[in-house]
Image (tube, grey):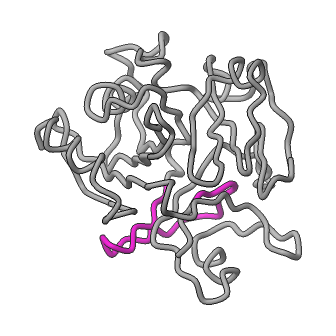
Amino acid sequence: MKRWALLAVIWASPAAAVTCEDVTYNDQSYTTCAVDLVTEDLRLFLRDENDNILGNFRNIEDTLGGATLPFAMNAGMYHDDRAPVGHYVQGGQEVMRVIPNAGPGNFGLLPNGVFCVNDQSAQVYETLVFVQKAPVCRDATQSGPMLVIDGALHPRFLKDGTSRYIRNGVGTSADGKTAVFVISNSVVSFYEFGSFFKDALKTPNALYFDGKVSRLQALSLGRSDPGFRLGPMVGVVQ
């Protein structure tokens, strides 16, 4: 798909408030889900009302009282017990503080960042900017590395990088009204994945969620990826 056509899909009118598409860019296949924050109820999920880890999309659906989950994906790195590695806020309640220094694995490929969600808006912040601005977030998840920082690719991504996995992440529009979630459909490098956000989607800021464990639910595409239990997840409730 050419870039202009891809942008037309991503920045579509609110009539299609959750728009999931399979697209090809530089011979790589990606699935994108663009969420209109003005009209859609985007939330983070980790535990149920009994404090049990939800772990998968089906368990989220069981907590919704008959509402549907047209879109969902894993949303941040986690420890073996599925607790978030970095900052995590759900429904205004902080579960984990901000980690301003390097952490384990790719989380420590600084700079990393925070995905901050409020009613009708969402933004990706580089972590130190997040600490400085201290925005109020109804829901938030910290992960890393950043993919795109103020329109520039993460400085440590190498064009000939050899680390290749199925990867997923999120980018936000400058006005915060649209969040674009992406999962690769084949293994990609950090450079390839970040370049898709920077050059194809043109999101000014984008954040890596994870690799290898990446999962997506997109009911409009008939897709709900199985797999082992997840930690933090993000989804649209309708």
Q: Quarter-wise, where is residue 46 in the image?
A: bottom right
Question: Does the magenta-highlighted stretch encompass residue 225?
Answer: yes
Location of residue 65 with respect to 232 vertically, above or below: below
User: In the displayed structure, does residue 226 sit left or right of residue 195?
Assistant: right
Q: Position of residue 89 (x, y in %)?
A: 78, 48
Residue drawn at point x = 40 percent, y = 47 percent: 182
Farthest top residue in view: 155
Q: Position of residue 172 (x, y in %)?
A: 47, 38
Q: Position of residue 104 (x, y in %)?
A: 72, 29
Location of residue 227 with respect to 168 vertically, above or below: below
- Counting every numbered tag in the picture gives 0
User: In the displayed structure, does residue 210 sit left or right of residue 95?
Assistant: left
Farthest bottom residue in view: 66
Residue drawn at point x = 19 percent, y = 37 percent: 25
188 or 10, which lies in front? 10
Q: Position of residue 208 (x, y in %)?
A: 52, 35
Question: Does the magenta-highlighted stretch encompass residue 52?
Answer: no
State the quadrant of the N terminus: top left
Residue drawn at point x = 47 percent, y = 66 percent: 71
User: In the displayed structure, does residue 229 sit left or right of residue 19?
Assistant: right
Location of residue 54 with respect to 112 vertically, above or below: below
Residue drawn at point x = 31 percent, y = 65 percent: 15
User: In the displayed structure, does residue 92 sit left or right of residue 144?
Assistant: right
Location of residue 19 with respect to 75 vertically, above or below: below
228 or 46, which lies in front? 46
Q: Which residues are magenta?
A: 215-234
124 or 51, which lies in front? 124
